[in-house]
Amino acid sequence: MAEELVASVALCGPAPARPPLLLVDDHRPYPAAILRVLGRVMHRRRRHGRGRPKHPALKPPPGLLVGVVHKLRDAKGRVRGVRTGARFGRLKDIRRRIRELGIGRAISTSHLERLNGTLRGHQARLARRTQAMSRGAGPLQWALWIFRDLYNWAWVHGALGGRTPAMAMRLTDHVWTVREYITDPVHADDLKREIWAEERREALTSALEREKPRKSLPTS
């Protein structure tokens, strides 16, 4: 799931020439997932030149910035504080990028935590200890897509001065109605979704796997 999440961010983010800024918590699978999706191949050498060559490994690409929020917990597992640091890249570069994006001055995951709270409040499928669970990935994905579009196009936000996020990003000049959203002819068709699925499979293939020689199929 960590690799799927990082792949989604990589597909929606900027061009590979400038990797995205990632602010994560101390979930253990994140570093390996980030290297698998965004990492480049590093051919390691032995110091003294003896022995068999080392196996290649993955290294972060130049410019990748990953800030981590370490949660300090007590003996019962309750969060008592946080400590921030840099996982990939320099700490001052991460803080400079945060200021450039206008999302604060320090490493924090508060924006995502706030969105998660809003999402759980509107989607009973994601609430804890609920009976409104999804028994398949398809219904859950469609419910999240509908929430995403209505949240960004049809719901006004007090923090944005009564505008929608789409209006704040200058994608539209008015608040959309639900009818306008349903009848808009820009929804992706099955072919487009297949293309997206292929791009996701490509993003989940690490650079090491791409360098492996593929076995040729026997021919008669």
Image (tube, rainbow, N blue to C red):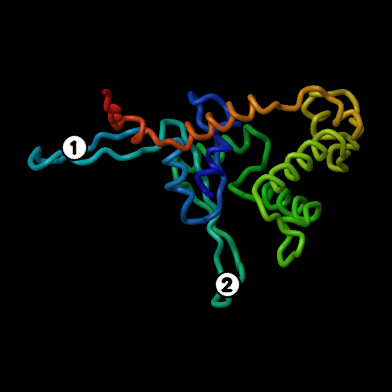
Instruction: List x then y, in percent, for residue 203.
Output: 49, 33
Q: Which residue is drawn at 50% across and 44% down?
A: 3
Q: Name the amino acid, label 2.
A: Gly
The residue at the far front in this view is: 220
Relative to 51, 118 lies left or right: right
| Res 131 → quadrant | bottom right
Q: Name the amino acid, label 1.
A: Arg
| Res 40 → quadrant | top left
User: Which one is in front, 117 or 196?
Assistant: 196
Instruction: List x then y, in percent, for residue 216.
Output: 28, 27
In three-dimensional space, the C-alpha distance between marks 2 and 1, rounded to whole angstroms, equals 43 Å
- Is 73 situated above or below 7? below
Relative to 189, 56 lies left or right: left
Mark positioned earlier in the residue sequence (2 or 1):
1
**SS for callout 2:** loop
Q: Name the residue that disc number 1 marks.
A: 45
- Is 188 situated above or below 37? above
User: Which one is in front, 196 or 37?
Assistant: 196
| Res 132 → quadrant | bottom right
**SS for callout 1:** loop
Instruction: List x then y, in percent, for residue 72.
Output: 55, 65
- Is 91 situated above or below 78? above
Relative to 67, 141 lies left or right: right
The residue at the far bottom in this view is: 75
Q: Name the residue that disc number 2 marks.
A: 77
Q: Which residue is drawn at 44% across and 42% down?
A: 88
Instruction: List x then y, in percent, for residue 186.
Output: 77, 23
Q: Residue at x 46, y 45 (%)?
A: 33
Relative to 208, 127 lies left or right: right
| Mark 2 neighbour density, 10 Å: few (under 14) some (14–19) many (20 or more) | few
The residue at the far left in this view is: 50
Q: Which residue is drawn at 75% across and 45% down?
A: 143
